[in-house]
Image (cartoon, grey):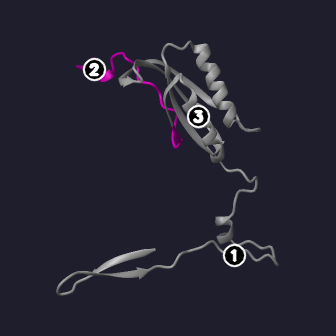
Amino acid sequence: MLRAAPVPCLLFTVHAVIFTPHISPPRRDTTSGATSTAERRWASPKEGVMTRQYEVVYIFDSALEEAAINERLARFHALIQQAGVEAPQVSHWGKRTLAYPVKKHETGYYVVAKFDAAATALPEFERAIKLDEGVLRHLVVVSEGAQPVPVTAGKTDEEDDE
């Protein structure tokens, strides 16, 4: 890594270049077969495929029927489904008014899904979503918390107190 540090001069500033060493993974001794903790840190998982938990939010065209939305969800989730991994957890939030028009639509049908998948499966999954004209917007993120709960349109406890 290069870092530049300014060195003052009379007429102009000179930047000195400082080199820092690059840390590479430890080399494995092929003769003994022993692995140290430092080597295990850089190693791949034993199964060869590392899965992460992802969360995806879909906004479908509100003109679509729920059966058509479920068929599209099944097609999308088939692309990321692996043997021995549980099916995605799907939560239908229903029709909502959008904050601004998206592709000339004022409302959309929201669906949130959580699933486990390998990172190598995501590009084809996102490609299929982008090609589907019934999907107005989508967002895939690495899940780090509990399943979000939709906010109801009724009064909250704070409004009742006033």
Q: In the rendered image, which residue does mark 1 sit on?
A: 27
Q: Which residues are magenta?
A: 140-162
Mark 1 or mark 2, whichever is nearer to me: 1
- The local secondary structure at tag 3 comes to strand
Q: Horizontal placement of 31 versus 106: left or right? A: right
Of mark 3 and mark 1, the one earlier in the sequence is 1
Label 2, label 3: how far apart the Cα atoms are? 32 Å
Mark 3 or mark 1, whichever is nearer to me: 1
In reply to whether residue 3 is colored magenta, the answer given is no
Which one is in front, 117 or 61? 61
Quadrant where the image shows the C terminus: top left
- The local secondary structure at tag 2 comes to helix
Q: In the rendered image, which residue does mark 3 sit on?
A: 114
Q: Residue 18 placed where, x, y %?
A: 40, 81
Residue 159's disc number:
2
- Total numbered labels placed on residues in the image: 3
Residue 121's disc number:
none
Of mark 1 and mark 2, the one earlier in the sequence is 1
Proximity of marks 2 and 3: CB atoms separated by less than 8 Å = no
- Toward the right, the furthest residue is 31
Label 3, label 1: how far apart the Cα atoms are? 38 Å
In reply to whether residue 143 is colored magenta, the answer given is yes
Residue ID at (58%, 34%): 114
Q: Determine crowd level at label 2: few under 14, some 14-19, many 20+ residues with C-alpha closer than 10 A.
A: few
Residue ID at (61%, 29%): 89
Q: Determine crowd level at label 3: few under 14, some 14-19, many 20+ residues with C-alpha closer than 10 A.
A: many
Of mark 2 and mark 3, the one earlier in the sequence is 3
Q: Mark 1 belongs to which amino acid?
A: Arg
Label 1, label 2: how far apart the Cα atoms are? 63 Å
Which one is in front, 79 or 104? 104
Q: Residue 30 placed where, x, y %?
A: 79, 75
Q: Mark 2 belongs to which amino acid?
A: Glu
